[in-house]
Image: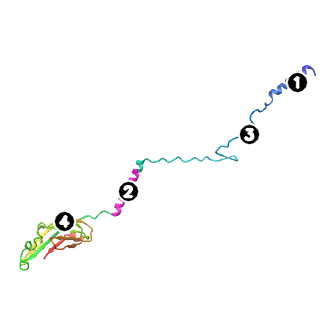
Amino acid sequence: MTSDDRTEDTIEQGRTDQTGPLPYTGPDPARVHHPTPDHVIPGGIHQALTTQPPARRVKHPILIALALGAVIAAGTVTGLLLKGSPPALITAHGTELVCTSILGDGGTPAEIYPDVTDGTQVTVTDPDGKVIGTSELSSTRDAEAAELSILPGEHVDAYAFTVKVPGGLARYGITAGHDRGTLYYTARQMKAGPRLGLNC
């Protein structure tokens, strides 16, 4: 082999070394750790990521107080509706007649019954005896009193009174004068006008 042939082989060998793959000088692949992402399950199957729901915002204390007040108010209104409104008042226009006989009693009504006259208090009570209304007697003209007065020796004084009482009660007790007893009337009789009589 001539010197020219050796030189040509050396050049060819150099080309081969320059164009061939360079040796790997990095870390050993077997020792490199590859972390698995949180959303990757071993085996290579992906799943949808689950996100935590956003935290609920705490309502403002004023809003909570207003809401609570509205609930209480609604409950109160409901209770009142269920309980019902109280009965309407009754305006009773009553009459009391006081009768005497000259022959039997020996005097006029004002002389025999001085506690039942103009200005005498009239008291109305409920079934439990509680006073629910008061009024006063006032002299008046009355058709029945006029009829009774035409009898010989008879004297009749008529008095009127007006009183307002609650409606819807089982009975109403009316008293006028001292120790004259209590007379009882229904709600219908109170509306029609209660009539009392003393010695008539």
Looking at marks 1 and 2 on the same chain, the residue that comes earlier in the sequence is marked by 1
Q: Position of residue 139 (x, y in %)?
A: 11, 67
The CA distance from mark 1 to mark 3 is 41 Å
Secondary structure category for the residue under label 2 = helix
| Mark 4 in CB contact with mark 2 (< 8 angstroms) | no
Return the mark for residue 9.
1
Q: Is residue 163 above or below residue 47?
A: below
Q: Quadrant of residue 200?
A: bottom left
The CA distance from mark 4 to mark 2 is 38 Å
Looking at marks 1 and 4 on the same chain, the residue that comes earlier in the sequence is marked by 1
Q: Amino acid at mark 1?
A: Asp
The CA distance from mark 4 to mark 3 is 110 Å
Secondary structure category for the residue under label 3 = helix
Magenta-drawn stretch contains 1: no
Foreground disc of the pair 4, 3: 3
Q: Amino acid at mark 2?
A: Ala
The CA distance from mark 1 to mark 2 is 108 Å
Q: Is residue 152 above or below residue 95?
A: below
The CA distance from mark 3 to mark 2 is 74 Å
**Callout 1 crowding tier (Cα within 10 Å): few <14, some 14–19, many ≥20:** few
Q: Quadrant of residue 116?
A: bottom left
Foreground disc of the pair 1, 3: 3
Return the mark for residue 134.
4
